[in-house]
Amino acid sequence: MTFPNFQLPNQKEWGAGIGGILAFLAIAALQYFHVSFGAQGDASIDGALLVFFPWFVAKLTPASDQDTLKSVNDTIAQAGTIIGKLTPASDSTAPVTPAAASLAAKAN
């Protein structure tokens, strides 16, 4: 039996998810206590909370060491793909990031 290839969310994604839950609870509290800013004000405040608060929390959340190592590992793997493309026996078609391309350029 094979398991699907999936990755758990990284620390920033968890932060954004928790920020979204907090924004939802803040909107629910405003409605529960009948705090109103007018029809347009309520819609704009709700939208701003639901969009910008999770984004802001994700920006403030630092990347964990494990997430950084995953990123470095992926970059090294892509650099190996680029170096492999330079050899005549290579048939790799994986997409290449700019970070991996610069790493491969330094290797040559």
Image (cartoon, rainbow, N blue to C red):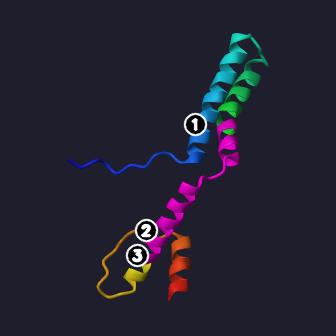
Disc 2 designates what residue? 95
Q: Position of residue 26 (x, y in %)?
A: 69, 23
Q: Which residues are magenta?
A: 53-81
Front residue (pair 7, 41): 7
For the residues labelled 3 and 1, say whether their Cβ atoms are less than 8 Å apart: no
Q: Which residue is mark 3?
A: 81
Query: Where is residue 58, by image quadrant?
Result: top right
Judge depth for marks 3 and 2 and give the one in front: 3
The spot of residue 21 in percent (x, y) is 60, 29
Horizontal side of 84 relative to 75 (left or right) equals: left
Q: Residue at x 54, y 78 (%)?
A: 103
> Does the segment drawn in magenta span residue 56?
yes
Marks 1 and 2: in contact by CB < 8 Å?
A: no
| Residue located at (74% from left, 10% from top) | 34
Give the crowd class for mark 1: few <14, some 14-19, many >=20 residues within 10 Å: some
Residue bearing mark 1: 17
- C-alpha span from label 3 to label 2: 9 Å
The secondary structure type at the circle numbered 1 is helix
The residue most toward the front is 65
Whether residue 18 is situated above or below residue 55 in the rendered picture: above
Q: Main secondary structure of the magenta part?
A: helix
